[in-house]
Image (spheres, helix red, strand yellow):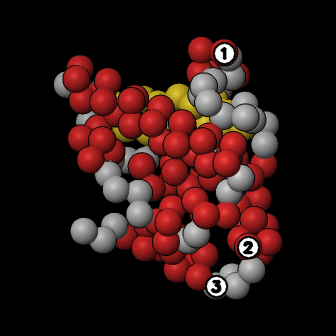
Amino acid sequence: MKDTIQEEIIEEFAIFDEWLDKYDYLIELSQTLPAIAAEHRTEEYVIKGCQSRVWVDARVEDGKVYYAADSDAIITKGIIALLIRVMNGRTPQEIVDMNLYFIDAIGLSENLSPTRSNGLVAMIKQMKMFALAFAAKA
């Protein structure tokens, strides 16, 4: 099933022919990430398995999940901004079941270093774990 937000991201990245331009766009996206609360920039919120430091927090409001995140690496921050854009405002179950096909469609997985790819997997896993925890509480 096609997802509107993922389709938008695929279209945005289709504009660029070169990966360097896509990296520049990721850097631009990193600046759109709302700041995470200072109390969530602690070890407790750090995602294990990322080479750079990435903090992620999530909350449920009216049955929908909303994420906040930050990273000390600008490309990683752009990637997490994309993940948040796709997952924010959905039910926990929608997030758990979500197929994040945009990652392959924009060529992200094949153009990341192995350590960044591991970090991407770790970020997705953590975000889905939050959703799973919220689904279990509901």
Which amino acid does the dot numbered 3 rest on?
Ile
Q: Looking at the rendering, which quadrant does residue 39 occupy?
A: top right
Are the residues tagged 1 and 3 within 8 Å (C-beta)?
A: no
Q: Secondary structure at mark 2?
A: helix
Q: Secondary structure at mark 1?
A: helix
Alpha carbons under labels 1 and 3: distance apart: 38 Å
Residue bearing mark 2: 19
Residue beneath the point at 39% across and 30% down? 129
Give me the disc on residue 15: 3
Residue 51 in percent (x, y) is at: 73, 34
**Label 2 or label 1, whichever comes before in sequence order:** 2
For the N terminus, the image quarter is: bottom left
Identify which amino acid the numbered label 2 is placed on. Answer: Trp
The quadrant holding residue 42 is: top right
- Amino acid tagged 1: Glu
Please rate how many residues cluster around mark 1, counting C-alpha atoms within 10 Å: few if below 14, some from 14 to 19, many from 20: few
Q: Relative to 36, is 100 on the left or the right?
A: left
The residues bearing labels 2 and 1 have C-alpha atoms spaced at a distance of 32 Å
User: Residue 93 placed where, x, y %?
Assistant: 24, 41
Q: Earlier in the sequence, mark 1 or mark 3?
A: 3
Circle 3 packing at 10 Å, graded few (<14), some (14-19), many (20+), is few
Outermost residue, front side: 114
Which mark is drawn over residue 43? 1
The residue sitting at 78% across, 49% down in the picture is 74
Residue at position x 37%, y 70% in the image: 4
